[in-house]
Structures are given as structure tokens and as C-alpha cells.
Amino acid sequence: MTPPRPRSARGDGPALRHEILDATEDLLIETGSEDAVSIRAVAGRVGVTPPAIYRHFPDKQSLLFEVCSLQFTRLGEHLDAVMAMEADATARLEACGRAYVDFGLAHPEAYRIMFMGRSDGTPDAHRDDVLAAAGPFMALVDVVTDVAGELGSEREPLAIATVLWTAMHGITSLLISKPNFPWPPVDELVAEVCATHLRGTFGQE
Amino acid sequence: MTPPRPRSARGDGPALRHEILDATEDLLIETGSEDAVSIRAVAGRVGVTPPAIYRHFPDKQSLLFEVCSLQFTRLGEHLDAVMAMEADATARLEACGRAYVDFGLAHPEAYRIMFMGRSDGTPDAHRDDVLAAAGPFMALVDVVTDVAGELGSEREPLAIATVLWTAMHGITSLLISKPNFPWPPVDELVAEVCATHLRGTFGQE
DNA sequence: AGGCTGTGTTAACGCGGTTAACCGACGGCG
DNA sequence: CGCCGTCGGTTAACCGCGTTAACACAGCCT
């Protein structure tokens, strides 16, 4: 029943920590449910007893958030890559939105943990204001600034970016939470919302 | 410690059921956390032992959803009342959006349970497609139809309403989940998003 | 060599949802 | 009138959860 148990680490400090993060991410993806990822399950997969986890993470929330945060680092890189491929600012904006939604749908449980959870359950390292200064949001502000430069707008890019974020989040989170609602195809939905905002915000026809 | 224990019901069938619903709602509002509302806590407040709950509800999820669903019935009534007060269709639309967001912020935990939870955790009686045919969403479709009638639009109201829902949900859920993000005032946010959609969708200046 | 630190263990606590088994009171029926 | 089923509660218990305390053993520093 426990053949991989005889696993034991020596003076290797952060090796197990890494394994724990990997195992947690795997479990999160496999089960697709935050609740199914128990400390005991993670420990079992790594081949270690549950309290060992606490030598490397203060509590379950921090572990989960660190895993999701790693995934979101990849989102940031993905966004950068996507935007580098589009010359037109408005095309960049739409590509950006689509990449955001796609990412959320590809990692639904991670998205839920980071953006659909209780505020007081989030560790200090992932406070709301930290998020506002983080890569993905700032990247969005940059794109909006570019679009505003091309099309002209009197409103400040940060406010526009905030609204756009709520729009993309609205799509993403509802698709995750209510997948059986009679949605139109995701592509259409995103394109429509982006177009609506472009027209509504920059008065473009 | 347990003076209200000697409570006991006779042939009153659904009386206790009602008490359980009330106690659950109270607890949900007081604690503001789904997790704090344990079966044991509810039972204790009603003055009954935990297994008694299961004579009236199949499991905790169903109990919680029934409570939230009751609150949302009130949202429907509230929406109706709000919309009856506005003559102008576009004003009705904005009032509708504001009422939706306000409701979510006033009942954050209920909103989270109904619209920010896992899809497979929701009882059958609250499936996604049931929601699409329910009062509040249909009310929105009606308003959109009115606006489209006033301003003219070639797109179908149902698609427009869906987009508007995602927009209002985006605002509501992010405000709930990330209250410390540097948001603009809620009123401004809602007004801005509504205006943007009106311009972007109906081409109104 | 001796002790400190870092990293794992075993054992246990308390709480959670939920189930099984029992049990008394009420209402209908022979 | 007395039996009996069902309704609506009880007590006891199961099992999994996050987490903590106490302990143990390795290797490095002095």
C-alpha cells in the first residue's frame, strides 16, 4: 500500500517543497476541485506524512495560492507572447481578452481560487492591492494606453482597463460557474464584448 | 448552556423546516461565511440536534441553496419595483444594473454561493438552464427588448441581455472577491459600464 | 565531541458532514 | 378501544479534514 514511502530527504532543503507544489498542482488539475486537494492527499502523493507539509507552507491556503500564482505567472508570459504577435492596438486588445478568458477556462479551479474566493481567505502575499500592481493587470493598462493613443480618448487608461477587466472576468467566471447556461460560443461572446467596449469607449465605428 | 433545548415539535410538519431556513439565513448574514454555517451551528441555533436537519433537507448544499434562492426571489421583486419607477427604457436598464450590483454587495455570501461556486456542487433544482428561464434574467431580457424597441437594434435582445449579465456579474463578483482593489466608486463603475454598453450596443451618443 | 538546526516522524485534538439505529407521540383503522 | 405505521426527533458513531505538539534523527558549526 505504501511502497513509495521509504522516500526520505537529507539536507536537500527546497527539493521537497518543489515536489509538494508540483503534486498540489497535479491534484488540482486532475480532480478539478479545491476540496479534493487535501493536505493528506498531497502528502500521500509526495510520499510523506501530512505534518511534513507544514515545514514548507504555513497553511493550506498559502500552498494553494502559491500554486495558482505560479500558473498565473505563466498567464502573464502568455499574454506578453500573444500581444507581441499583433501589430494593431485594437487587435492586441481583443487578443488579450481572448487569452485571458481562455486561460481561465483552461485552469478553472486556479481561476476560482484566485478570483472567485473569499477576500479574507487570501494570504497577505496575494492581497488585492498587490494584484493591481501585478504583471497581467499592468499589461492590460499598457494595451489600453496604446489603443487610446491610436484612437484618442479623454478618459484615463487605468479606469478603462478596470472596466475591461470586470468585463472579461464576468465572462470567464460565469462560464466557469454556470457552464450549462445557454451561452453563445465563447469566441463570439468575447469578440462581441470587446467590440462593444471599443465602440462604447472610443466611439469607433 | 442548553436552556432552549427542551424545544420539541408535535405534528407540526414544516414548522421546524421554516425555522431551519431562517436560522441558516441569519447565520449566513451574521457570520458572512458559508463555512461558518455548519449543520451543527444551525441545529444549535434552532435548538435541535444535527441529524434532525436531515429530516428536512437532503444535505447542506440544498439547505444553503434554498436559503439563497429565497433571497433571490426578493431580488426579483426588488428589480420589478425598481423598474416600475423608471419611465425611460434606458434609465430602467441602468437602474436594473445598479439594483443587481447593490443586491450582490448587500448579500455577498448568498451571491457567492449562487453565482461563484462550483457547477457540480449545485443541486438539481438550481441547474444552470433553470436559471436562464428564471425571473431576474427574463426581466433583464424584457428591459433590453424595450430599449431595443426605443433605440432600434438589429441584434437579438437575448444575446444583448446575456452580455449585460456578464458585465454586471463581473463588477459584482470582483467587488465581492477583491474589495481592496483600488476601485472607483461603485456608482461610477456601474454607470460607466451601462453607458459604455448603451453606446457600444445601440450606437447612441 | 557536543550541541544546534533543519526536516522528517507519530500521536492526537477538535470540528466537519453524514449515517445508522432507536424511540416516543400522533392519527387512522380494524 | 387498542394496535400499528409513520413522522420527527434522539443518541452514538464513522470517517476525513486542517492543524498542532512532542519527539527523533541527520548533518554542520564550533
Image: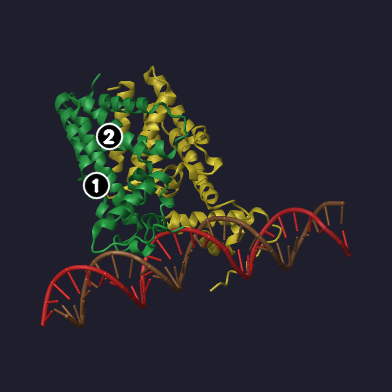
Chain colours: A yellow, B green, C red, D brown
Regarding residue B59, the answer to whether it shows in the image is yes
Q: Give me the residue at 35% from left, 40% from top.
A: B107
Q: Which residue is mark 1?
A: B131
Residue situated in front as seen by the camera: B191 or A153? B191
- Amino acid, disc 1: Leu
Q: Secondary structure at mark 1?
A: helix
Q: Residues within 10 Å of mark 1 (few under 14, many from 20)?
A: some
- x and y percent of residue A138 in the render? 48, 31
- Comparing labels 2 and 1, the label whose residue is closer to the camera: 1
Q: Which residue is mark 2?
A: B164
- Which quadrant holds residue A149? top left
In the rendered structure, the answer to whether residue C12 lies left or right of residue B111 reads: right
Q: Secondary structure at mark 2?
A: helix
Mark-to-mark CA distance, 2 and 1: 16 Å
Q: Give me the residue at 34% from left, 48% from top.
A: B25
Q: Residues within 10 Å of mark 2 (few under 14, many from 20)?
A: many
